């Protein structure tokens, strides 16, 4: 086999190709979905319901999906099933124009699509740990795909207008489903003994102890600030006189910094324990949101946006490796899905709270983000006190 074909036959390469597509449909919806809904005379209140309903459904079923994925012969099976569903259901967007129809179709889309990341991340981190390869480099392609998707959507809307939204969303959803077919097997062969299967918890209830749950809560708190960044911060910046072009650049800097950290993570992660990565994310969150609350100049905001490399990329990698370090392959997806449920629940509560805070206090509400960082810091410190890092 030629070196070129051998490279693309590697399981890490095939996983990277799929990771690139995981968030492509999400990037399209982030750019234009709300506008598309408003063009169909959907009210802001109804838009909020359409976006919130899938989150509530995911909270109810994500653990169940993770458990099913763990019971399959390989996590690839559940990833493929969800990708195929998430690829076919969007075709329904061509045929719905009113609230209830859109709500039903979008809930099916978002639930099937949202079930993919925790399972594919759990599967990939297990595979790369076993093979001695870099999870960060594989996962980074998900961020690269998201950035590419937002750029592609922006150009498509400029060229063809709003009529491009549904065809583009459907096309990228089908592309993700198609590339799921080439995913490798992730699980270790049945006869292969690994550290995970010999020394780690084989049931989720075995690790649902304060020292294990607190770091998951800590990252959920940190991640909730990212939900605010992606949904509300642009409005505050706009009200403070920052142009849309500059806001776009600020968002791009955060995404670019995240991708860079993911690509170089192996050099960092080998020197720091998983919980200390989450600790660093909490400290960076405190600093980032405290300074943002002081209404700094735009130049300082660009510097703060680079901290996304620590608050999200480093913190998230700390989370997935912490889970992998203390659980076996038998509950890999279920444990990751449990963490995902905590993140979603915390994000819902935080978004509801920040909506009121921003309306009342504007940019000063950013100090509440620093408060979430303080709570996350306390969670990690208590966990380390209860169970020191190895």
Image (cartoon, rainbow, N blue to C red):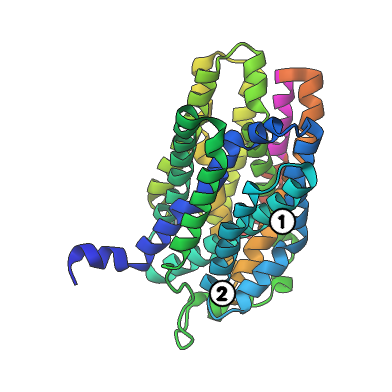
Q: Residue 259, position in %: x, y?
A: 44, 42
Q: Residue at x 66, y 62 (%)?
A: 337
Q: Residue at x 62, y 57 (%)?
A: 89
Q: Residue 286, position in %: x, y?
A: 64, 32
Instruction: Give the position of the C terminus as an image quadrant.
Output: bottom right
Instruction: Decide if residue 306 is in sight here.
Output: no
Tag 2 secondary structure: helix
In the picture, the disc for residue 329 is: 2
Q: Is residue 234 above or below residue 115?
A: above
Extreme residue toward the top, this view? 241
Instruction: Give the position of the N terminus as an image quadrant.
Output: bottom left
Q: Residue 307, position in %: x, y?
A: 52, 33
- Mark 1 or mark 2, which has the lower sequence index? 2
Tag 1 secondary structure: helix
* Magenta span includes 371: yes
Query: Mark 1, residues whose alpha carbon is within 10 Å: few (<14), some, or many (≥20)?
Result: many
Q: Is residue 249 left or right of residue 30?
A: left
Which residues lie in the magenta part?
Answer: 363-374
Kindly indicate whether the residue at mark 2 contacts the one at mark 1 (C-beta within 8 angstroms). no
* Magenta span includes 84: no
Q: Residue at x 66, y 34 (%)?
A: 34
In the image, 284 versus 124, the foreground residue is 124
In terms of image quadrants, where is residue 389? bottom right
Q: Residue 328, position in %: x, y?
A: 58, 74
In terms of image quadrants, where is residue 109? bottom right
The residue pinned by badge 1 equals 341
In the picture, the disc for residue 327 is: none
Q: Is residue 319 left or right of residue 190?
A: right
């Amino acid at each position: 086999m030629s070196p070129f074909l051998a490279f693309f036959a590697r399981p890490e390469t095939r996983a990277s190709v799929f990771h690139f597509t995981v968030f492509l449909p999400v990037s399209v919806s982030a750019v234009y979905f709300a506008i598309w809904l408003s063009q169909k005379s959907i009210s802001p209140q109804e838009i909020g319901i359409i976006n919130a309903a899938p989150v509530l459904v995911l909270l109810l079923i994500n653990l169940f999906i993770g458990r099913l994925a763990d019971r399959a012969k390989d996590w690839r099976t559940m990833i493929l099933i969800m990708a195929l569903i998430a690829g076919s259901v969007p075709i329904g967007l061509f045929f719905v124009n009113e609230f209830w129809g859109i709500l039903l179709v979008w809930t099916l889309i978002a639930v099937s699509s949202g079930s993919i990341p925790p399972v594919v991340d759990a599967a990939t981190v297990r595979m790369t740990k076993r093979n001695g390869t870099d999870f960060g480099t594989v996962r980074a392609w998900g961020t690269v795909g998201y950035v590419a998707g937002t750029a592609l959507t922006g150009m498509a809307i400029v060229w063809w207008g709003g009529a491009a939204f549904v065809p583009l969303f459907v096309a990228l959803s089908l592309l993700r489903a198609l590339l799921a077919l080439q995913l490798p097997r992730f699980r270790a062969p049945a006869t292969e003994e690994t550290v995970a299967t010999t020394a780690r918890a084989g049931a989720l209830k075995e690790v649902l102890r304060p020292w294990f749950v607190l770091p998951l809560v800590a990252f959920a708190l940190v991640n909730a600030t990212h939900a605010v960044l992606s949904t509300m911060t642009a409005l505050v910046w706009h009200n403070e006189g920052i142009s849309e072009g500059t806001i776009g650049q600020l968002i791009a800097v955060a995404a670019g910094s995240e991708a860079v950290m993911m690509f170089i993570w192996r050099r960092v992660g080998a020197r720091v324990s998983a919980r200390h990565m989450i600790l660093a994310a909490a400290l960076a969150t405190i600093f980032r949101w405290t300074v943002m609350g002081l209404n700094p100049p735009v130049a300082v905001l660009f510097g703060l946006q680079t901290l996304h490399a620590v608050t999200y990329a480093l913190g998230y990698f700390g989370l997935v490796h912490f889970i992998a370090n203390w659980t076996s392959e038998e509950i890999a997806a279920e444990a990751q899905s449990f963490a995902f449920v905590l993140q979603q629940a915390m994000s819902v509560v935080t978004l509801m709270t920040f909506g009121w805070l921003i309306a009342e206090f504007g940019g000063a509400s950013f100090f509440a983000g620093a408060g979430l960082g303080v709570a996350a810091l306390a969670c990690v410190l208590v966990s380390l006190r209860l169970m020191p890092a190895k």
